[in-house]
Amino acid sequence: MLQRIQTIYLIIAFIAAGVLPFVFPLWTTKNGEHYYFIKNLAYVALFGLSTTLTVVSILTFKKRKKQFVMGRLNIILNLILLGLFVYQSLNVSGETDPALIVSEKGIGIILPIVSIVFLSLANKAIKKDEDLVKSVDRLR
């Protein structure tokens, strides 16, 4: 059913992965330029996959097990994205490209964390629904 709490959590995760990266920069360079995710193909692919998985997960509300698995895959995808952000901001400081010298980290770096939190809450609610359905089936 679409009116469950996990749908709300998945919609918030969709907003965090699909809408907010266009609004918030990942970091600011020394030149004062905002660096958005759209400038890097890997970030575009990972945010796009995360958004797609979230939408497909919302639309497969009748198949709770499949929805649960997609939520876990999405969490792993966001952890990879977060790892890339941490690696980029800490280790590749600017020796390779002088235009990418990170002077200030933006709020866009924490968007995968927000997405992970809401995907975890959605998976918890999906698991709760699945347990409820199993308990009702046991009574029949």
Image (cartoon, rainbow, N blue to C red):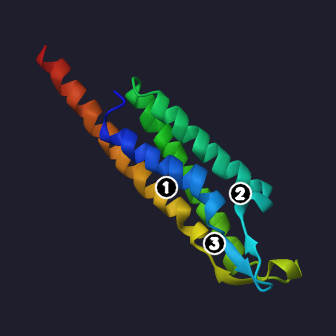
The percent position of residue 3, horizontal first and vertical second, equals 32, 33
Circle 1 residue: 115
Q: Secondary structure at mark 1?
A: helix
SS of the residue at dot 2? helix
Give percent across and percent down for residue 109: 59, 69
Q: Position of residue 16 (x, y in %)?
A: 52, 55
- The front one of 67 and 58 is 58
Q: Visible in this render: residue 75?
A: no
Q: Residue at x 47, y 37 (%)?
A: 69
- From this view, report whether residue 138 is shown above or below residue 43: above
Q: Which residue is mark 2?
A: 43
- Badge 1 crowding class, 10 Å Cα cut-off, few under 14, some 14 to 19, many 20 or more, is many
Q: Residues within 10 Å of mark 3 (few under 14, many from 20)?
A: few
Amino acid type at mark 3: Val
Q: Nearer the viewer, residue 113 or 22?
A: 22
Q: Residue furthest front?
A: 23
Going from N to C along the chain, the mark reached first, 2 or 3, is 2
